[in-house]
Image (cartoon, grey):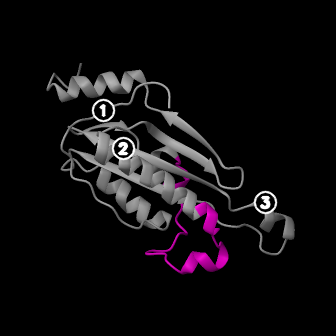
């Protein structure tokens, strides 16, 4: 894998759930930034739908991309931005239905292989958290058709800031 893992060995409540569309993601973004929420790891997996069902080329070339974003807040400080701050169009989307399941699928169906890729990558992130207490990536962009990923690894500055917070040092350092 190369490089060393970032090991936030702290106790944090973890939650999991289905966040199918942007309306739900906006709610979780609001929750993430509440002052009362001091510690949170928010893992979001998203996939693109198949576009332009009227055109064969659009159908054949779309619906393969996706991303995993790991948001991390510790001692009320955001160390890794959640998905809505990485992909700001999520917070700007006012047309996404709530709760969303079943409504958007008709207009933008998803590919099975893309969903399986997203699930496998999200599983790997959770596996690292549970077994090694490590976060390796902030964002993982992927393409299921090309079998490729493009991870954004945790920066040295973020790792160092976490260590300062973990030691209980002044938050303004």
Q: Secondary structure at mark 1?
A: loop
Compute the Cα span from label 1 to label 3. 38 Å
| Left or right of residue 36, residue 109 in this image | right
Q: Residue 39 appears in which quarter of the rendering?
A: top left
Residue at the far top in the pictured view: 173
Q: CA distance from mark 2 to mark 1?
A: 10 Å
Measured along the vertical axis of the image, is residue 87 above or below residue 61?
above
Dot 1 crowding, Cα within 10 Å, few <14, some 14–19, many 20+: some
Which of the two labelled residues, at mark 2 and mark 1, occupies the earlier sequence position?
1
- Placement of 85 over or under 170, stated as above or below: below
In the image, residue 144 sits, relative to residue 157, either above or below, namely: below
Q: Position of residue 58 (x, y in %)?
A: 81, 64
Per the rendered image, the range of residues in magenta is 87-114
CA distance for labels 2 and 3: 32 Å
Does the magenta-highlighted stretch encompass residue 111?
yes
Q: Residue at x 43, y 26 (%)?
A: 155
Residue at (32%, 45%) from the top-left corner?
129
Q: Which residue is mark 3?
A: 61
Q: Is residue 82 left or right of residue 167?
A: right
Q: Residue at x 55, y 62 (%)?
A: 116
For numbered disc 3, what is the local secondary structure? Answer: helix
Across and down, in percent, residue 7 comes to 30, 32
Instruction: Examine the rendering and report whether any part of residue 28 can be seen.
Output: yes
Q: Secondary structure at mark 2?
A: helix
Asked whether the beta carbons under mark 1 and mark 3 sit within 8 Å of each other, the answer is no
Specify the quadrant of the image occupied by residue 151.
top right
Label 2 belongs to which residue? Answer: 128
Q: Is residue 31 magenta?
A: no
Within 10 Å of disc 3 (Cα), the crowding (few <14, some 14-19, many 20+) is few
- Residue underneath mark 1: 7
How crowded pointer 2 is (Cα within 10 Å; few <14, some 14-19, many 20+) is rated as some
């Amino acid at each position: 894998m190369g490089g060393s893992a970032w090991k936030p060995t702290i106790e944090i409540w973890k939650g999991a759930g289905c966040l199918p569309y942007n309306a739900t993601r906006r709610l979780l973004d609001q929750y993430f930034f509440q002052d009362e929420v001091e510690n949170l790891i928010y893992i979001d997996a998203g996939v693109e739908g198949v576009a332009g069902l009227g055109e064969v080329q659009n159908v054949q070339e779309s619906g393969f991309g996706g991303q995993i974003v790991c948001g991390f807040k510790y001692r009320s400080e955001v160390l890794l931005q959640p998905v809505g701050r990485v992909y700001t169009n999520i917070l700007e989307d006012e047309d996404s239905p709530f709760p969303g399941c079943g409504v958007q699928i008709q207009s933008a169906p998803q590919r099975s292989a893309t969903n399986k890729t997203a699930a496998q990558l999200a599983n790997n992130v959770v596996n690292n958290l549970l077994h090694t207490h490590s976060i390796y990536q902030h964002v993982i962009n992927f393409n299921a058709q090309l079998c490729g990923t493009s991870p954004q690894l945790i920066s040295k500055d973020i790792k160092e800031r976490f260590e300062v917070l973990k030691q209980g040092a002044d938050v303004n350092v």
